[in-house]
Image: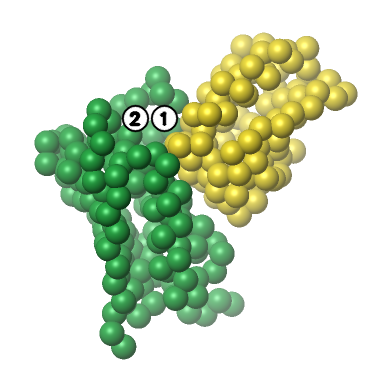
Chain colours: A green, B yellow
Amino acid sequence: MENNRMTLTFKSLSENESFARGVISCFALKLNPSLSELSDIKTAVSEAVTNCIVHGYSDKIGIITIDSEIEDNVLHINISDDGVGIEDVEKATQPFFTTKPDDERSGMGFTIMKSFMDDVVVKSEKGSGTKIYMKKIIKTDKN
Amino acid sequence: MNIKFKNQLETLTLYVYGELDEYSSSNVKNIMDKVILSNTNCKKVVFDLSGVTFMDSTGIGLLIGRYKIVKKFNIPVYISGTTLATEKVLQLAGIFSIMPKL
């Protein structure tokens, strides 16, 4: 069967966080995910998009792109921005690491993405944006 | 999202409703703080999350921030009404070790 694919671009406004996770859950519905799997996908996408808005484009409004593909029972998601980038990806993805503790940021974003998805790859360099790839395998045997 | 509260039998319960993300949490942070600071005569604070339909790590930050304020008054904090939408995120962050489930 032909893989299904969609691309979504939107402005880095906080109100688009719920829009983005709404779109990805609609797209993922074709895979007949469980409520728990759908919740995992929504939460991971929300974390990635929030990172783009709060960190990538902290001092300006930019464009965020979500590119997603369905391949058999696997959902591939690419989320990218052209923001400030991450200087040290290894450090940034550690649990409880945050550059904004005064804003009550928990530093749990990447930990949630890694725990809720089957694969997470972060590609970033200071000054040249961030690309996050995530994969979720939808279990076909719901028992 | 929305907040309702009641202070009954020395327990202050804050009921949280709706989606808890970065966009929505900034609106309710100050409301929650005002409620907490005007009810410091209570013996226990409970965050009732049964009405939360979505929560990401912003919710963890929000709860820990409010926990720190309540703790200044030596009042214990609890969480109740966790669902599929909140349980896994809270568990992962180890929240229940400082705010046990009721």
Q: Residue at x 65, y 51 (%)?
A: B83
Q: Whole-percent x and y of residue A7?
A: 27, 63
| Chain letter behind tag 1 | A
Left or right of A41, for residue A51: left
Q: Position of residue A36 (x, y in %)?
A: 54, 62
Mark number, residue A98:
2
Helix, strand or loop under label 2: loop
Q: Secondary structure at mark 1?
A: loop
Whether residue A127 is situated above or below residue A110 in the rendered picture: above
What residue is at 60 percent from the left and 29 percent from the top? Answer: B98
Callout 2 crowding tier (Cα within 10 Å): few <14, some 14–19, many ≥20: some
Quadrant location of residue A2? bottom left
On residue B58, the disc is none
In the figure, is residue A11 to the left or right of B14?
Answer: left
Q: Residues within 10 Å of mark 1 (few under 14, many from 20)?
A: many
Distance from disc 1 to disc 2, alpha carbons, whole Å, reads 7 Å
Q: Which residue in the rendered view is the most extreme toward the right?
A: B9
* Subunit ID for the residue under disc 2: A
For the C terminus of chain B, which image quadrant?
Answer: top right
Q: Label 1 is placed on what type of residue?
A: Arg
Marks 1, 2 in one chain? yes
For the view shown, which residue lies furthest in the bottom direction? Answer: A1
Q: Which residue is mark 1?
A: A105
Residue B94 visible? The answer is no
Q: Position of residue A116 (x, y in %)?
A: 43, 55
Inspect the image, locate mark 2, and give the three-letter code of the amino acid beneath it. Thr
**Contact (Cβ within 8 Å) of mark 1 with mark 2:** yes
Write down the quadrant of residue A6 in the picture: bottom left
Q: Is residue A72 above or below residue A38?
A: below
